[in-house]
Amino acid sequence: MEFLGIGPLELAFILIIALIVLGPNDMVKAGKAIGRMLRSIVTSPNWRAIQQTSRELRSLPTKLIREAGLDEIQKDLPKADAIRRELGVDEMSKDIQNLNTQLSEWTTPPTIGAPPHSPENPSTPPSTSESSEKTDKD
């Protein structure tokens, strides 16, 4: 519950400070004066005009959409999920993620002390001399 942007804890804090500053007798007088002032504000025609204008401004976007007929057009537009499925965005993102992991395996520096292209270090590509030796042996 908020009133004029003031929550219950803030209101309690303000009341405690007012009680300390004004004292119990002046607190009652100040409360009556504030109550009269708020009543005169709320019952004034200016306050009613402000409230009416505020309601009109809040309902204006909905009213404009209805008058322009955009709500029917918006219903006819495809949803974002349908567009993603149609274009295959999910599959493309999976492919890109797979490529990133493969590239990171190739670009990760080898660990110190491990021989190149060993089972402990599969991220290093085979050297050209190893591949040429394999072709010569076959």
Image (tube, helix red, strand yellow):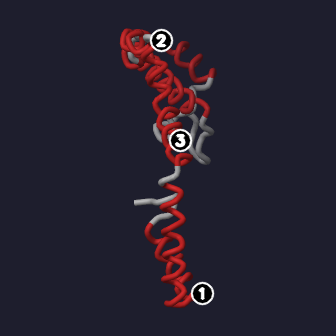
**Whole-percent x, y for residue 24 in the image:** 49, 90
Classify residue 79 as left or right of residue 130.
left
**Amino acid type, mark 2:** Ala
Q: Nearer the viewer, mark 1 or mark 3?
A: 3
Q: Which residue shows up at 53% across the image and 57% down it?
A: 41
Task: Identify which amino acid the numbered label 1 is placed on.
Answer: Val
Report helix, strand or loop for mark 3. Answer: helix
* Marking on residue 80: none
Q: Residue at left 43%, top 11%?
A: 69
Q: Which residue is mark 2?
A: 68
The crowd level at tag 2 (other Cα within 10 Å; few <14, some 14-19, many 20+) is few
The three-letter amino acid code for the residue at tag 3 is: Ala
Lower position in the chain sequence, tag 1 or tag 2: 1
Name the front one of labels 1 and 2. 1
In depth, the one of 62 and 107 nearer the eye is: 62
Say which element carries label 2.
Answer: helix
| Mark 1, residue position | 21
Task: Residue under label 3, please give it.
Answer: 49
**Residue beneath the point at 51% across and 27% down:** 102
Q: Cα distance, mark 3 to mark 2?
A: 27 Å
How far apart are the alpha carbons under marks 1 and 3?
36 Å
Query: 52 above or below 34?
Result: above
